[in-house]
Amino acid sequence: MGNHPFRKIPDYLRSPEAKLKYNRELFNKIAGRYDLLNKILSLGADSVWKDSVIAMLPEVQSPSCLDVACGTGDVTFRLSGKYPKAKIYGVDLSANMLDIARSKNRSKDVSFVLADMCNLPFSDNSFDLVTGCYALRNAADIYQALTEVRRVLKFGGNVCFMDFSKPANRFSQRIEYLLLKLWGSFWGWMFHRDMRSYGYIAESLRLFPDSNELKKTLADKGFKNISSRKYCFGIIEAIMCEKANNGEPG
Ligand SMILES: C[S@@+](CC[C@H](N)C(=O)[O-])C[C@H]1O[C@@H](n2cnc3c(N)ncnc32)[C@H](O)[C@@H]1O
């Protein structure tokens, strides 16, 4: 995995335990303003990217769906809109994000569960579709999160991850880091008087695989038919793939 070319990695990213604790505290703190800040930080484009993720998903009747790192339910409710007969679960680490999601929920078929995406409380092969928007970058251990997502997916089931995309080129990484750090820190300060809260987006990319490495990791982890679509000059990428059957009992 590519390390960042400059400056020390923050302590809260150095171990899965520290990152898990940091993320829980961070998202509990910013939950109340998350939806608004998301719109502002993306200049309104976030909902367009999410609509596009939903449009990429297959047209099936009533799939069982899981939205990991569902936050306030933005993608979970879009899944419910596309698949009105489906049973849908949203999983998140932050109780405060989930409280907001639950307060918006109008469907008996949509449920929200407090859990770590690296330790999902579902049986093997139980979902037809998994989504994760800004999910993998936040996982305390991306490899464990992928193992879990693959475990709960049915063979042939699809997963779509959307997140900031890290370019392979070091110079481009540096430019992306600086732009995200400045933009996130500014809005973090404006809304929370804390530059670190949204400066975290840039920091979390530092130990995240670049776009090519991520696709290779997905293939190594037992996913196939990997395709992707980029948005916003390549800063955002949606990656779609399918659970391969590596000779396991289905
Ligand atoms: C940037 S938000 C994305 C929320 C939502 N998917 C969206 O697109 O608006 C990231 C979410 O990941 C959650 N998260 C972070 N680490 C997690 C973990 N280990 N397991 C589950 N959720 C996690 C946070 O609580 C937060 O709600």
Image (tube, grey):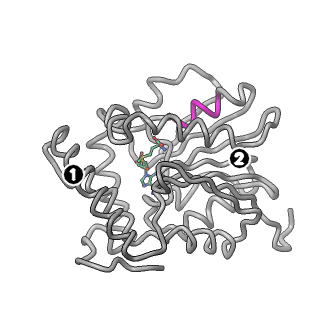
Boundaries of the magenta span: 74-80
Q: Toward the viewer: 24 or 208? A: 208
Q: Secondary structure at mark 1?
A: helix
| Amino acid carrying mark 2 in the image | Leu
Residue 66 on image: x %, y %: 63, 44
Q: Earlier in the sequence, mark 2 or mark 1?
A: 2
Seen in the picture, residue 66 relative to 209 is either above or below; the reply is above
Q: Which residue is more in the foreground, 29 or 175?
A: 175
The one nearer the camera, 110 or 131, is: 131
Q: How many residues crowd mark 2 within 10 Å: few (<14), some (14–19), many (20+)?
A: many
- C-alpha gap between disc 2 and disc 1: 34 Å
Quarter of the figure that contains the C terminus? bottom right
Q: Which residue is mark 2?
A: 129
Q: Position of residue 245 (x, y in %)?
A: 82, 67
Predominant secondary structure in magenta? helix
Left or right of 19? Residue 136 is right
- Decide: marks 2, 1 in contact (CB < 8 A)? no
User: What element does badge 2 sit on?
Assistant: strand
Residue 2 coordinates in the image, percent (x, y): 44, 79
In the image, what residue type sits under mark 1?
Answer: Ser
Q: Nearer the viewer, residue 59 or 40?
A: 40
